[in-house]
Image (cartoon, rainbow, N blue to C red):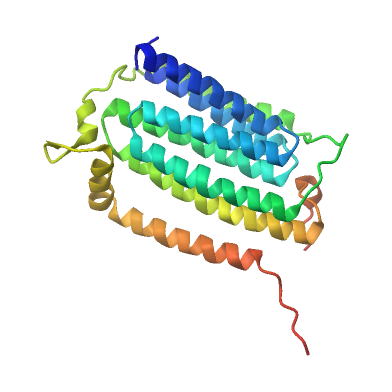
Amino acid sequence: VTITLNHYLIVSFLLFAIGFFGVLVRRNFLTVLMSLELMLNAVNLNLIAFSQRLSDLTGQVFAIFVITIAAGEAAIGLALTISLFRLRRTLNVEEAATMRG
Amino acid sequence: LTGGAGWAFVVFAVFALGTALAVVLARNPVHSALFLLSSFLLVACIFFLQRAEFVGAVQILVYAGGIMVLFLFVIMLVHQRTVKGATAFQHQWDIALLFLAVFLVPFLYVFWTENFPPLAQNPEALRTVRGRPAGNTEAIAWTLYRDYLLPFEVASIFLLVAMIGAVVLGKRTIEKAD
């Protein structure tokens, strides 16, 4: 089979959609964070595919920056997870709906 | 990609999507984390297929190495028992479907109207530095440190801020003894 840019776009969109569903419908805060990582990964897939097709390295450099942001986001998100668990003894995002501390 | 590489892409893509779905659907967060790990590795394989070796290696080192270890540490720390019988999903399916439509419509519009180049125009440009052939890593280094030096520095400051923020968020509040 011959793989064109369109196939990459479809795979990347599906990956993004799966991550998006995960963020919205999961209750466990950890799984929500993992789904966020899936979405960032889908963006990277797109960046690499376009970098390849347009013969421009900017896409790959941008993907490296996205990975950097993902690392920072994971660190902050997991610190939030720990403080949420310490406060509520749960990771259910529905029980963390109140704004009172 | 043609021939065997094309089939390899199909296999990697199908398994990456399948494991991504398993991340969302798995009840146990440990299972989710392991499926996420395999999804990252498969996406890295797709990067290797496209001859973006450096980004693939960074993906394996940072995602599969660093972020997954963080996730597993936190899963271990919070030590949450999966509640039998309780649903793992909340009631936001309607919002999720609505937003999926919001994403899908522009995607399909661009997908049908735009004519992307089917093949790489000049694939050797990705591995050439100043007219001489070089590796993918060297080409990325030239681009990153010459054209994108300021974003690179900003990224390092971002990481510093994220580190400080994570420490501040994660530390226990010290009770002042009076």
Q: How many marks?
A: 0
Q: Residue at x 40, y 40 (%)?
A: B57
Look at the image and tell me in which quarter the N terminus of chain A lies.
top left
Q: Residue at x 76, y 61 (%)?
A: A86
Q: Residue at x 76, y 49 (%)?
A: A91
Which of B175/B53 is in front? B53
Say above or below: B91 vs A101: above
**The image quarter in which residue B14 lies:** top right
Question: Does residue B62 show up?
Answer: yes
Question: Does residue A97 show up?
Answer: no
Is residue A92 shown left or right of residue A3?
right
Percent of width and height locating residue B120 = 27, 22
Percent of width and height locating residue B71 = 62, 48
Is residue A49 shown left or right of residue B119?
right
Percent of width and height locating residue B143 = 25, 45
Say above or below: B171 vs B23: below
Is residue B20 shown left or right of residue B151?
right
Look at the image and tell me in which quarter the C terminus of chain A lies.
bottom right
Percent of width and height locating residue A27 = 75, 41
Which of B144/B76 is in front? B76
Which of A18/B78 is in front? B78
